[in-house]
Amino acid sequence: MQRNIHAIATLAIIMAIGMLFYYRIWDQKILGMDGDSSLSLHQPYIACYDIVMLNLIFWLGKKYATFRQRGFPKWLENFINLAVKVSFGMYLNQTLGLLMLSWLLSVFSLPDWIMMMLIPFGWVLVIAISFMIAWFCYKVPPFGFLVGRPNWHPFRIVNERLFRSSTFER
């Protein structure tokens, strides 16, 4: 079982690197396809890539469930709770982080091999920007509704007074 997991993880890494070459070099440089055509679900490599990545995510979910049953350290538990609160907001505003990264990369106009080396840093940068925006919106009223966590409602006081004065019990 453990050997199969390592094989899936290794295959996922190899396919992710292969995806970069396939997308950037084969589809865009050699075939001259645009970004939408390159990422079409009808591409055979994309279908295989998706299957491997879905298996990897399923495996990671099972590992997380196993670790969660054993118990996490307090700092990790707090971090996970914080991430859960803003994860939907991060999903909603990830485009802003991607736009900032795109702008940064266009300013520097780096060669392809450097861009490939910077992928992990770009990934972390987009996550950090999305997290900061979502956390700000989560904490500062009235922006909570932008990340799916309303922290202020204009009729909250009226609603509380109505229910306090009525005989209706919840």
Image (cartoon, helix red, strand yellow):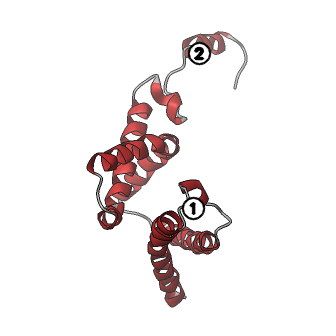
Tell me the distance, in whole angstroms, between the alpha carbons under discs 1 and 2: 54 Å
Nearer the observer: mark 1 or 2; the answer is 1
Tell me where residue 55 sits by quadrant.
bottom right
Q: Which mark is residue 169?
A: none
Tell me where residue 136 sits by quadrant.
top left
- The local secondary structure at tag 1 comes to helix
Q: Which mark is residue 38?
A: 1
**Residue 13 pos. (x, y %):** 45, 76
Tell which residue pokes out farthest to the right in this image: 168
In terms of depth relative to the viewer, which is nearer, 37 or 48?
37
| Residue 163 horizontal side relative to residue 121, left or right | right
**Residue 156 pos. (x, y %):** 56, 16
Type of amino acid under label 1: Ser
Whether residue 48 is visible to the viewer of this picture, yes or no, is: yes
**Residue 152 pos. (x, y %):** 50, 22
Say if mark 1 contacts mark 2, CB within 8 Å.
Answer: no
Q: Residue at x 50, y 90 (%)?
A: 3
Whether residue 130 is visible to the viewer of this picture, yes or no, is: no
Q: Is residue 3 above or below residue 151?
A: below
Type of amino acid under label 2: Glu
Q: Residues within 10 Å of mark 1 (few under 14, many from 20)?
A: some
In terms of depth relative to the viewer, which is nearer, 68 or 40?
40
- The local secondary structure at tag 2 comes to helix
Whichever of labels 1 and 2 marks the residue nearer the N terminus, that label is: 1
Task: Read off the residue under disc 2.
Answer: 160
| Residue 131 horizontal side relative to residue 7, left or right | left
